[in-house]
Image (tube, grey):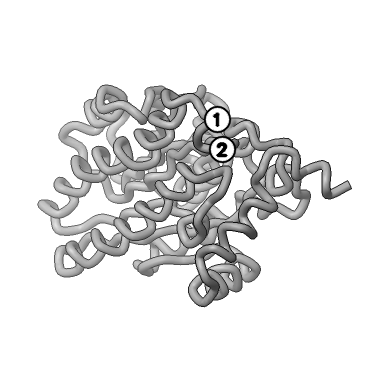
Amino acid sequence: MNSTTRPLAVVTGASSGIGYHLARCCAEKGFDLVLAADQPLEAAASDCRSLGAVVEMVQAELASKAGVDKLCAVLAGRKVDALLANAGHGLGKGFLDQNFTDIQHVIDTNITGTLYLLHKVAQDMRQQGRGRILITGSIAGFMPGAFHAVYNGTKAFIDSFSAALRNELKDTGVSVTCLLPGVTDTEFFMRADMLDTKVGAADDKADPADVAKTGFEAMMDGEADVVAGMKNKLQVVMAKVTPSQVRVEQHRKIAETGTAEKMQ
């Protein structure tokens, strides 16, 4: 990768969806990029290069320490100005009906791999006295997720962890922002095997480009967190005053297998 004087951003989960558009936002604002995902990255890299960015791709399993180490090896000795930790997976159906290997993969992607990457990159940022971090959480973290229990639980962890890390780094020159999207029009529901659910089949999902822009701008402004979309902001407010058993029953009605049929 050619050395330039442009700032460097690292975007995970950049092959599609919100991550792809976060990468574009970085390229449009003058960042060079290291893009990482467990899926091919050629299309995202090509688009970002067309916007003037120097781009390097790392296809790796970011649920594993080995995959994160592969990404960090590319970053060795280089100053990372922005880390956009966006990689994440969902998993539909009831907890007891899921394969535990799949469950473990969701936890390892959303929590373990994300924290391992943050632990390595943020240490360098703290040492250099500057840097921006954007972590993709979810409004799902505010709601017990019947038939999406593991995913919602991991996002509750990430939402909480992001706020704590921000506080720990508040006097270091490193900012931490948590992006809190709602239902977004990406490959997420297909990969989570949730196309036969009401939430997966909904036709009013948010545009991932809009969600990414919201998150990117919040990161650049150093905000603590940002909920993407007015509808989602209202859902978060209601979640804070609604009993958990009411919220979990509401979630069941949109996430249980077969609920897509009830929309017809």
- Name the residue at 30% across, 60% down: 176
Pinpoint residue 85: horizontal percent, then vertical percent: 37, 45
Pinpoint residue 235: horizontal percent, then vertical percent: 59, 68
Q: Choose top left, top right, bottom left or bottom right for residue 238.
A: bottom right
> 27 and 168: which one is in front?
168
Asked if disc 1 and disc 2 are in contact, CB closer than 8 Å, the reply is yes
Q: Which residue is mark 2?
A: 94
Q: Choose top left, top right, bottom left or bottom right for residue 211.
A: bottom right
Name the residue at the right extreme.
Answer: 264
- Name the residue at 49% across, 37% down: 89
Callout 2: few (<14), some (14-19), or many (20+) C-alpha neighbours within 10 Å?
some
* Kind of residue sitting beneath label 1: Asp
* Kind of residue sitting beneath label 2: Gly
Using the image, determine if residue 80 lies above or below residue 162. above
Q: Quadrant of the N terminus?
A: top left
| Disc 1 element | helix
| Disc 2 element | loop
Left or right: 234 as drawn, with respect to 144 = right
Using the image, determine if residue 150 lies above or below residue 66. below
Q: Which residue is mark 1?
A: 97
Pinpoint residue 221: horizontal percent, then vertical percent: 39, 68
- Name the residue at 39% across, 62% down: 220
Name the residue at the left extreme.
Answer: 127
Asked if one can make out residue 55 in the rendered structure from this viewpoint, the answer is no
> 184 and 128: which one is in front?
184
Q: Choose top left, top right, bottom left or bottom right for residue 167.
A: bottom left
> 122 and 263: which one is in front?
263
Using the image, determine if residue 106 lies above or below residue 252. above
Pinpoint residue 263: horizontal percent, then vertical percent: 83, 49
Left or right: 175 as drawn, with respect to 171 = right
Callout 1: few (<14), some (14-19), or many (20+) C-alpha neighbours within 10 Å?
few
Measured in 3D between alpha carbons, the distance from the residue under mark 1 to the one under mark 2, in whole angstroms, is 5 Å
